[in-house]
């Protein structure tokens, strides 16, 4: 998707930064309300190959690669920590697919979720309404709208880069209980894993967290993107012309600078696990 994420934390003049930020919020609103995304449970590019121990949920059928991104955080990246959480908090939960998947992996768990987009938050709340103790809260740009030490497993797919990594880690440390786990993923265009990992290590130590694991997952996200191109082409063909061009960038389609960065190794997608002692 276009790199509005980085502009928000850059040195471009404040009015331009604000304008681009408002555009970003509006774009998400349009996508969650009117685009094909509104018919789905996830809004992440996915991870392939699928793990053999993935749970298959009828509600998430057809979105297995996106569910796999959550499986990675809930199982693959943390297997050695053997998590047995009571409360899972998904930051930037989107439309709730990740919360449903988290419940399938940890059936007794209470689900907390937050997203700065109200349309997505309401849909997520409906998706998990049948699960006792679920709490969905519309988020804000800069903080996690939950009380301190409320969850023992904090997860996030795609949202940490919007917060800024250091701010995300500080906020995740606040809402995580002692002994808890924080597992998240994200990506940067023209990214550098050495720089990303260094920031995360600094942020973890500054917030009293233990840096547990970092992984370059770009080959897996690029595999998911390539596998999904025919479906994306078909959906973009139905989008009206002026929006279609922008849609191709959002969808990282061949011919876009975004796709080119995947193909030439200038994209950096990562997954990271931190622990709160
Ligand atoms: C790429 S989408 C991923 C959604 C969901 N995690 C998924 O995988 O389907 C990123 C999400 O982060 C949300 N987001 C961005 N900044 C946020 C913030 N500060 N607080 C809460 N949510 C945020 C966006 O509204 C969006 O729903």
Image (spheres, rainbow, N blue to C red):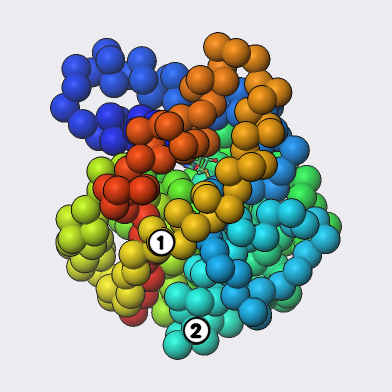
**At 59% from the left edge and 64% from the top edge, which residue is drawn?**
68
- Tell me the quarter of the picture where residue 99 sits: bottom right
Q: Is residue 248 left or right of residue 66?
A: left
Above or below — where is 130 with respect to 24?
below
- Which residue is at the front of the view, 233 or 124? 233
Residue at the location (61% across, 59% down)? 65
CB at mark 2 closer than 8 A to ligand 1?
no
Rendered image quadrant of residue 272: bottom left
Inter-mark Cα distance, 1 to 2: 21 Å
Judging depth in this view, the residue of 193 and 89 nearest the camera is 193
The answer to whether 131 is drawn above or below residue 231 in the figure is: below
Task: Residue 4 in the image: state x and y as whole percent.
Answer: 36, 30
Which residue was labeled with disc 2?
79
Residue 26 in view in this figure: no
**Left or right: 100 as drawn, with respect to 184:** right
Q: Are marks 1 and 2 in contact (CB under 8 Å)?
A: no
Q: Residue 219 — which label?
A: 1
263 lies above or below 69: above
Q: Residue at x 70, y 23 (%)?
A: 238
Task: Indicate which label's residue lies in the foreground, 1 or 2.
Answer: 1
Q: Give the class, few, some or many, for how many residues have Cα within 10 Å of label 2's Cα (few <14, many ≥20).
A: few
Q: Residue 61: percent from the left, percent from the top?
A: 77, 57
């Amino acid at each position: 998707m276009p790199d509005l994420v980085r502009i928000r934390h850059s040195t471009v003049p404040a009015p331009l930064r604000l304008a681009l930020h408002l555009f970003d919020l509006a774009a998400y609103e349009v996508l969650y309300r009117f685009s094909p995304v509104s018919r789905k449970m996830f809004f992440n590019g996915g991870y392939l190959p699928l793990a053999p121990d993935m749970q298959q949920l009828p509600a998430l059928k057809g979105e297995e690669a996106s569910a796999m991104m959550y499986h990675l955080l809930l199982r693959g990246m943390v297997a050695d920590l053997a998590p047995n959480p009571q409360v899972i908090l998904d930051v930037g939960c989107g439309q709730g697919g990740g919360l449903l998947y988290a419940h399938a992996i940890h059936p007794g768990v209470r689900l907390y979720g937050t997203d700065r987009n109200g349309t997505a938050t309401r849909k997520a709340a409906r998706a998990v309404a049948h699960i006792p103790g679920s709490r969905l809260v519309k988020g804000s740009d800069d903080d996690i709208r939950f009380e301190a030490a409320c969850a023992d497993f904090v997860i996030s797919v795609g949202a940490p880069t919007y917060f800024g990594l250091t701010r995300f880690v500080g906020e995740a440390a606040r809402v995580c209980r002692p002994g808890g786990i924080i597992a998240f993923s994200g990506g940067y265009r023209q990214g550098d894993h050495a720089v990303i990992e260094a920031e995360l290590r600094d942020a973890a130590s500054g917030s009293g967290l233990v840096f547990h694991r970092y992984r370059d997952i770009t080959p897996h996200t690029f595999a998911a993107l390539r596998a999904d191109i025919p479906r994306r082409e078909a959906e973009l063909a139905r989008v009206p012309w002026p929006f279609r061009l922008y849609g191709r960038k959002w969808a990282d389609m061949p011919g876009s600078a975004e796709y080119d960065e995947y193909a030439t190794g200038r994209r950096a997608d990562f997954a990271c696990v931190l622990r709160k002692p």
